[in-house]
């Protein structure tokens, strides 16, 4: 197997997995199937992407220097399909999430408190039309709380995400998508399926699925190649259903950046970047 390139400039532990178990070695057949799946996703993404810089946006990389939890200089390069960043609470996942959302430093984040310099820097490189990030922010940046809020008031959520289209049609489309998604799980097997009108009685996992269904339906309506940035997407989904949610997300077209807690995601996703546990040791240059 070809050795992976060195990533010394990242200053973080880099783990590119080819199996759920990092110690597991894939057979030649399994590796070929995995590479073919990646190739198919890249091809699908390429054909789906628009032809001009005005109708797509993609994140290429983010560099941070003495920013918040990050001491020293660190760089994260993003795949065109999916990039997974894992770390425990306080390791910097949400710091990166907000820096991407701001296309630079979050006004509430200051220089690293252990740094000798008051200078900090955040650089976000993108391809395409950066104006789309501000316009479609609700469709790009998602966390478990925002997905749950969408299920609190489906009527208002559909109106806010319709972008000039019919809110009723969007809600109907999201509901159909939700029924398909939840149909893959066991939520409906032990008790009757709860209709949309009874969403206040849903479990947290069902709220997450519905919020995601609404976002994906709205993204389909705008028909623009937008990245999907997810912070803690699996937190409100029980362990039994995380693999199903991961499988569903992993098969979506377009760029995806997932930031999740290590202990939640370790047995679920392929991890690209692993942030050190702040409770064990401080981030520092390698």
Image (cartoon, helix red, strand yellow):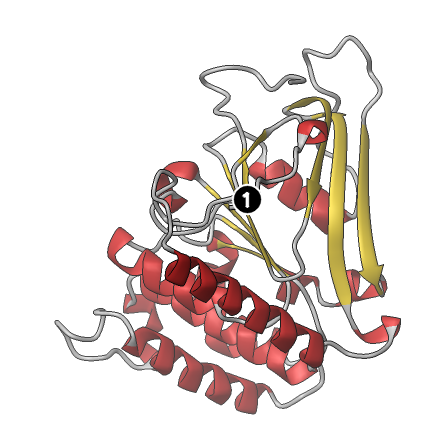
Q: Determine whether, in the image, residue 99 is placed left or right of residue 214.
A: right
Q: Quadrant of residue 166?
A: bottom right
Q: Determine whether, in the image, residue 185 is placed left or right of residue 109.
A: left
Q: Is residue 153 visible?
A: no
Residue that sits furthest to the top in the current view: 116
Above or below, comparing residue 55 to residue 4 in the picture: below
| Classed neighbour count for the residue bearing mark 1: other residues with Cα under 10 Å, few (<14), some (14–19), many (≥20) | many
Above or below, comparing residue 175 to residue 263 in the picture: below
Q: Determine whether, in the image, residue 104 is placed left or right of residue 197.
A: right
Residue 93 on image: x %, y %:
57, 38
Q: Is residue 261 visible?
A: yes
Residue 173 on image: x %, y %:
49, 87
**Secondary structure state at the residue bearing disc 1:** loop
Residue 218 on image: x %, y %:
60, 78
* Residue at the disc numbered 1: 272
The residue at the point 36 percent across, 53 percent down is: 236
Residue 275 on image: x %, y %:
54, 31
Q: Which quadrant is home to the C terminus? A: top right
- Near-viewer residue (23 or 265): 23
Residue that sits furthest to the left in the current view: 190
């Amino acid at each position: 197997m070809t050795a992976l390139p060195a990533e010394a400039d990242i200053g973080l532990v880099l783990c590119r997995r080819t199996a759920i178990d990092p110690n597991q070695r894939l057979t030649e057949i399994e590796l070929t199937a995995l590479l073919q799946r990646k190739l198919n996703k890249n091809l699908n993404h390429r054909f789906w992407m628009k032809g001009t810089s005005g109708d797509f946006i993609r994140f290429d990389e983010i560099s941070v220097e003495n920013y918040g939890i990050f001491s020293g200089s660190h760089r994260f390069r993003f795949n065109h399909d999916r990039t997974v960043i894992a770390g425990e609470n306080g390791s910097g996942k949400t710091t990166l999430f907000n820096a991407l959302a701001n296309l630079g430093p979050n006004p509430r984040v200051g220089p690293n408190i252990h740094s000798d310099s008051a200078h900090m820097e955040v650089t976000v490189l993108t391809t395409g039309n950066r104006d789309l990030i501000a316009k479609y922010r609700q469709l790009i940046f998602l966390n478990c709380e925002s997905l749950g809020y969408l299920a609190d008031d489906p009527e208002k959520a559909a109106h806010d995400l319709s972008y000039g289209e019919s809110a009723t049609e969007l809600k109907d489309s999201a509901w159909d998508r939700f029924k398909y998604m939840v149909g893959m799980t066991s939520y409906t097997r032990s008790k009757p399926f709860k209709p949309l009108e009874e969403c206040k009685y849903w479990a947290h996992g069902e709220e997450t699925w519905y919020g995601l269904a609404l976002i994906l339906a709205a993204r389909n309506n705008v028909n623009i190649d937008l990245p999907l940035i997810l912070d803690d997407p699996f937190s409100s989904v029980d362990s039994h259903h995380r693999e199903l949610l991961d499988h569903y997300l992993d098969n979506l077209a377009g760029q995806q950046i997932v930031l999740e807690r290590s202990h939640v995601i370790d047995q679920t996703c392929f991890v690209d970047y692993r942030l050190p546990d702040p409770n064990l040791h401080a981030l520092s240059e390698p």
